[in-house]
Image (cartoon, coloured by chain):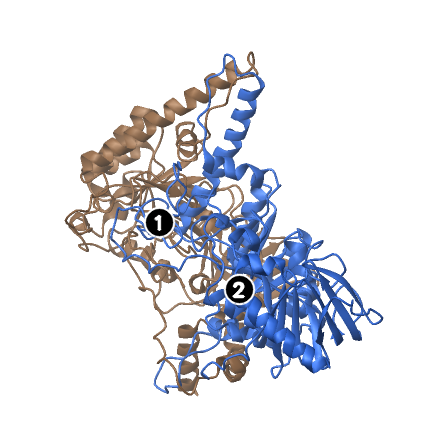
Chain colours: A brown, B blue
Amino acid sequence: MKQFIAKLLLVAIIAGLPLSSVRAQKQTAPETLIRNATVLTVTRGTLQNTDVLLRNGKIAAVGKNLNASANARIIDGTGKYVMPGIIDCHSHSMLDTINEGTLSVTSMVRTADVLNTTDVDLYRELAGGVTTLNLLHGSANPIGGLNTVVKIKYGRPASEFLFPGAMPGIKFALGENVKRSSTPNLPGVTRRYPNTRMGVEETIRDAFIRARDYKRTWDEYREASKRDKNLIPPRRDLQLEPLVEILEGKRYVHAHCYIVSEILMLINLADEFGFKIKTFQHALEGYKVAKEIAAHGAGASIFADSWAYKIEAYDAIPYNAAIMTRAGVVVSMNSDSDERARRLNIEAAKAMHWGDLTEEQALKLITLNPAIQLGIQERVGSIEVGKDADIAIWNGHPFSVYSRVDTTFIDGDVYFDRAQDLAQRPELAKKRAALEQAEPNRPRPKGESPQTPRRRPSGHADDDIEVEKP
Amino acid sequence: MPKVRLCLLVASTFLLLNSNANAQRSAIDTYAITNARIVTVSGPVIDRGTVVVRNGLIAAAGANVNAPPDARVIDGSGLTVYPGLIDSYTNLGLPEAAPSPSPGGGGGGGGFFALTPPRPASGPNSTQPPGLQPEVMVEDVIRPGGNEIEASRNIGITTALTLPRAGIWMGQSALINLAGDTPQQMIVRSPLAMHVGFTPLRTGGYPGSLLGVFAALRQMMLDAQRYRDAMQIYERAPRGVRRPDTDRSLAALVPVLEGRMPVVMLANSEREIDRALDLAEEFKLRLIIAGGREADRVADRLAKQKVPVLLSLNLPKRTTAAIPEADPEPLSVLRERVEAQQTAGKLAKAGVRFAFQSGSLTNMSDLLGNASRTIENGLSATDALRAFTIWPAEILGVQNQLGSIEPGKIANLTIVRGDLFDRNSRVTHVFIDGRPFELKPAQESPKQ
């Protein structure tokens, strides 16, 4: 029987079976009461034998012996752990395409235009206790596209995924990916500018000078058009508008970077134009300039222990999170990978091993800190009354490799439930068998040999890889 | 006697087909199809009646209509007369598609219709690269004749919307009749619609990804809005205003932005259709969806916003043989093949207007068979016929000219021995602009 279930599981994973299940899976109840659990609040310590009440999509109460209304769903939390939904500050899940790589400045492109709500990775991430993603453009250009912050409302329309009130953001990138270090030099083919880190700096500076001029042109037009109705308005430029928003402090910059020189370069450049970098993404050498990053007011969103996968990644150390945290940098641990995104709890736990962060500091790496980095800390990131009911129930401490998620809630609704998932697999297997028997799916007597289903790389440490999702 | 007449007709038709244009124009132009079952689409079915065609138009149709004395008479016993079928999304009449360039070739630009260098089809003096030239008109490049047009006619198609093969702003389509000796004779209406595809350029230039495609579409529409405003300001009082540059690409988008010309966006999956709807909403476009494989999943929104669908009958089916050691096919693929057959029926129930189209079927003789599959999966036969006739005519704005058998409409007729959607039936004649074509029995394609 165990083997049978294992096989079913395998088939389900390969074939993306959960997809269909979840459309029907979202369970709505006005109230949910989790009784007698260990609650990892993140901001108010760990509470033993505590109840959590979810009502109308919010955390309504945290305490002992709470009462719920008659129709509330009651979950026995004995022996279980409740933690806030994990926030992944660097994800490319549910994007049909990641890079617009033809130009060096692509601030006109928007990840919100290419969302794929049926991406099965989303379901796997829910099963890892993740509830919020920062969907970033790739790192093919010094100034990349606009990001999208989403709640993983798998099975719902794309418009419901969008995190209300999240700060708009944009991807920048520095170093090897943007200077196309891994692009082959072909005779007769002009390489895209820039090809050096000096050129990267010039590209970004040039873009902001253009943005400053653009803003001035519009300001002047608005002033002059009050007197002269016959003025032809300036051109609206979708490339420069987001850069003006950065200059006005209305858009966060998430900058992919590796080494000290480029981190300092970007801090200086931002100071020159009077804006802030919100996060340095990856920042493998961040520990070397932790004070400078903290002084600028930037955060860092990093890997736990990935390194040496390319030249600029050689000086990484696993103490990065601990050193930067102690220097006052708001640090988060991200996935940049559909695979790693399922186990960010373990990535955070590593920071207790390497560098002796406290449990609460380590928890913050995947909850409150990424929330701060995305401007959503008033809504999510900890278990506090009034915050969104985005939580996960674990069957053990989330920092144990043996623990797994039982149930994941977003806005008080269930989006992943392990027991329900397992229970409906026989039914799904039947549905699959019926589909295979349908006429259009019957194998042809003669025909091509079947193609191996396309599998995407399960994990990549760096987001320059263009993955076209099927 | 009728037999003699029929023989005469066949002989004269043969002559007609082989004579030059002038001869055709002066030849017989009055026909009567007698004793036929007439499916008018606009009214009740006439079990036994006569259709009179004169001067390229339908002159009369009914149970009590007599053949005029000057008419060539076709004995329609055992035949059913339908309005000519309309294929609402094709590349008919276009020059052959050239093979696509090898990836990574870089530079060179590329011609428009297949994005290959040699073809000079891109708009001259355009401000935009090929693929982003909305000013391109299919009217300028179509040619009469050719195997593809004949293949479509052989299965009963008399009219087709034809559009450029590729691009983001693909260009402007024309509605053509599948007969005529010059492009001008073929055209029923041009330009009919603007066409958008969400396929990135393959030239190495921007936009090279779906992300960029949306940004480029948006930027050009914003530029076109400004272009229109700037031109208006300038024309109101040119003295003292610096003259704006003219731009044919942006000028071509103005009727689209003002809702005077519909935009057909190619979108098959649920998310592609949602994105098209979002973009159309953002710029208040008159949207038509083409493809529409998962349109049933967006049916509520399509119905509410009154967005019609040009639904592809290129239904997916498994093409591979059974090999036990192969991986199982993904569930999404299995489901898509089954559900694609049900889309038409679901759209009809949800009140979404749609028209059938061939969706670049490689074998046109599958078209009516695939329509039958949609009937087996929930669509009524009546609606299936409408989706080939009056519905495309309405969606494309030519319902006063085409789509039903009514006096005064263009004499496009499809005449079938048996029922159109019966797999054993045979299209025997089509009339196009009142001109008869006797059809050879469909050549059986090698069974797959």
Out of B230 and B38, give the one closest to the viewer: B38
Q: Residues within 10 Å of mark 1 (few under 14, many from 20)?
A: some
Looking at this rendering, what residue extends furthest in the right direction? B64
Q: At numbered mark 2, what does the secondary structure look like: helix, strand or loop?
A: loop
Asked if the residues shown at circle 1 and circle 2 are in contact, with their CB atoms under 8 angstroms apart, the answer is: no
Q: Residue A201 at what x, y percent from top left?
A: 24, 33
Q: Residues within 10 Å of mark 2 (few under 14, many from 20)?
A: few
Instruction: Give the number of the mark in front: 1 or 2.
Output: 2
Residue in view at x 53 percent, y 33 percent? B225
User: x%, y% of residue A375?
Assistant: 45, 40
The chain holding disc 1 is B
Residue B264 visible in the displayed image? yes
Q: Do badges 1 and 2 share one subunit?
A: yes
Chain containing the residue with disc 2 = B
Figure quadrant of the C terminus of chain A = bottom left
Q: Viewed as shown, does residue A113 lie left or right of B192? A: left
- The residue type indicated by label 2 comes to Ser
Return the x and y of residue B247 as percentages of the image width and height.
Answer: 45, 32
Q: Amino acid at mark 1?
A: Gly
**Is residue B423 left or right of A210 when viewed as pictured?**
right
Residue at horizontal 40%, vertical 42%?
Answer: A373
What mark, if any, has residue A194 been given in the picture? none
Q: Nearer the viewer, residue B169 or A190?
A: B169
Compared to B383, does A160 lie above or below?
above
Secondary structure of the residue carrying tag 1 is loop
Question: In screen coordinates, is B400 left or right of A141?
Answer: right
Q: Quadrant of residue B257?
A: top right
Percent x, y of residue B299 = 64, 60
**Residue beneath disc 1:** B111
Which residue is found at the position 39% from the left and 82% from the top?
Answer: A447
The residue that label 2 is drawn on is B19
